[in-house]
Each structure stands twice: as structure tokens, then as C-alpha cells.
Image (spheres, helix red, strand yellow):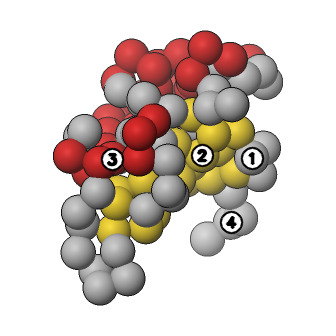
Amino acid sequence: MEKPEKQIFVCASFRVSGDAQGACRKKGAVDLLGYLESELADRGMTGVTVSSTACLKACDRGPVMIVHPDNVWYGKVNEEAIDGILTAMEEGTVAEQHVLT
């Protein structure tokens, strides 16, 4: 496997015990993983990987997504937000309207 250019992390609210419990999961974060993978493939963004994470401790602003190595945190992510975020990534910019501050 070649090292990816970027990694997208999606909070899936997993706890140390392995249970998925938190707000991001309840707000549909896990369902966004498949959508992200599909959109990346459709756009030919082969240098980007997607992973789920443990709780990112921003529950009130979830679902939360991080683009690494840019260290850009996005909140209240849904399919529409993902479309804008991926378009911004393709353009080399940041989808400011979704950034957590």
C-alpha cells in the first residue's frame, strides 16, 4: 500500500471498551463512512483514505470529521457538507463554512 496524501477521520464514537455510544454515532456518522468512500471513488481521489475513530470529544458539534495532515476539523457533517469538503479538497482549499473553530 502506498502512503496516502490525505486521511479523513470520522468520529464513530467508539469508547475504550469497544462500544459505540456517543453523539456522532447517534447523528449518523457511521453511515457517512460509506458515502465518503463512494464519493472519493467517484471523484477519482485515490490518494485519500477514510477511517473511523474513537470519540473526538466534540460531541455537541458532531458528526466530526478531520482531514489530516491539514489538521482541519469539520463539524455537523452530513452528505451535503461532505460534497463541499471534498470539492474544497480537490481545489486545494478549505470548506470554511463547516470548519470547527
For residue 30, say whether it is visible: no
- Look at mark 3 in the image and give the residue it sits on: 24
* Three-letter code for the amino acid on which mark 2 is drawn: Ile
Q: Residue furthest front?
A: 60
Q: Nearer the viewer, mark 3 or mark 1?
A: 3
- Look at mark 4 in the image and give the residue it sits on: 2
- Look at mark 1 in the image and give the residue it sits on: 71
Label 4 to label 3, Cα distance in Å? 30 Å
Q: Earlier in the sequence, mark 4 or mark 3?
A: 4
Q: Earlier in the sequence, mark 1 or mark 4?
A: 4
Query: Could you tell whether 61 is left or right of 14 in the image?
Result: right
* Residue drawn 78% across the image and 44% down it: 70
Rendered image: mark on residue 66: 2
Query: Could you tell whether 8 is left or right of 69 in the image?
Result: left
Answer above or below: position of 80 versus 71. Answer: above
Label 2 to label 1, Cα distance in Å? 7 Å
* Three-letter code for the amino acid on which mark 1 is drawn: Asn
Label 1 to label 4, Cα distance in Å? 21 Å
Q: Nearer the viewer, mark 1 or mark 4?
A: 1
Rendered image: mark on residue 92: none
* Three-letter code for the amino acid on which mark 3 is drawn: Cys
Q: Residue 18: which quarter of the image?
A: bottom left
